[in-house]
Image (cartoon, rainbow, N blue to C red):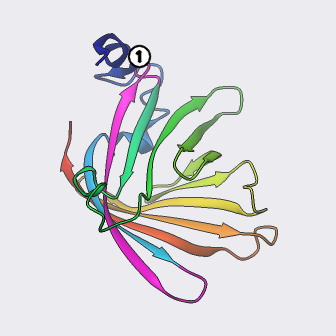
Amino acid sequence: MNNTFIETLVSEHGHPRLQDKLKPYKIFIGAWEFDWAGHEDDGSTWTVPGEWHFAWILEGRAIQDNWICPRLNLRSSGKYPDGEYGTTIRFYDFKENCIKVIWVGPILSQLTIFKAHHSKDQIVQNEQTVGDKGKSSRWVFKDINKNSFKWEAYTTDDDQNMWKMNQEVYAKRKSST
């Protein structure tokens, strides 16, 4: 393993200039376990257990997460499909005065760029690029506290007038480091 790579990527703290700008995501730093639920157009739903790890990176100038669904110990069990093993990077864009979010999901060949907006009780990430099937995405973190949160994913294909939830996650904290 390349320890120098890890040492130069991961940071113990947020950068002093950026801690306040990335504050909405700071609460997520650490390890989480979750139950993911997928919703099909026909009304069917299925669930898969997963894990989610958040850390400061790049001198504390960004927050990265690793999304693993199903959990590492279940990936080769044959009980669940491969799902996704992806990563998201969040950083503050001073030019646009907003948090930019980039999701990379290599198993499903996904690359999505969002702009994030937050209020006291939720974070909303709106897709800035249109997906392969002409659909746009919105991801919402809500019911956020130090030990749990809910995440919802929505899609629309009609000029953002009608959003349909197709994924949701119920996460519980595993550890804060």
Q: Position of residue 101 (x, y in %)?
A: 57, 41
Residue to which mark 1 is pinned: 59
Q: Position of residue 10 (x, y in %)?
A: 34, 22
The quarter of the picture where residue 94 lies is top right
Is 113 located above or below residue 62 in the figure? Answer: below
Residue at (28%, 22%) from the top-left corner? 12
Residue at (55%, 80%) from the top-left corner? 40
Does the stretch in magenta take in 53? yes
Would residue 10 appear left or right of 43 to someone viewing this image? left
Quadrant containing the N terminus is top left
The quarter of the picture where residue 59 lies is top left
Q: Position of residue 69 (x, y in %)?
A: 37, 56
Say which of 81 and 24 sits in front: 81
Would residue 7 appear left or right of 167 to someone viewing this image? left
Work out which residue is located at the far left of the displayed protein and give it.
Answer: 175
Quadrant containing the C terminus is top left
Say which of 125 and 167 sits in front: 167
Residue at (76%, 54%) from the top-left corner? 130
Residue at (34%, 68%) from the top-left corner? 48
Amino acid type of the residue tagged 1 in the rendering: Glu
**What crowding class fits label 1: few (fewer than 14 Cα within 10 Å), some (14-19), or many (20 or more)?**
some
What segment is highlighted magenta in the picture? 40-61
Is 153 located above or below residue 128 in the figure? Answer: below
Is 9 located above or below residue 96 in the figure? Answer: above
Count how many numbered circles sit on residues in the image.
1
Work out which residue is located at the far top of the displayed protein and give it.
Answer: 4
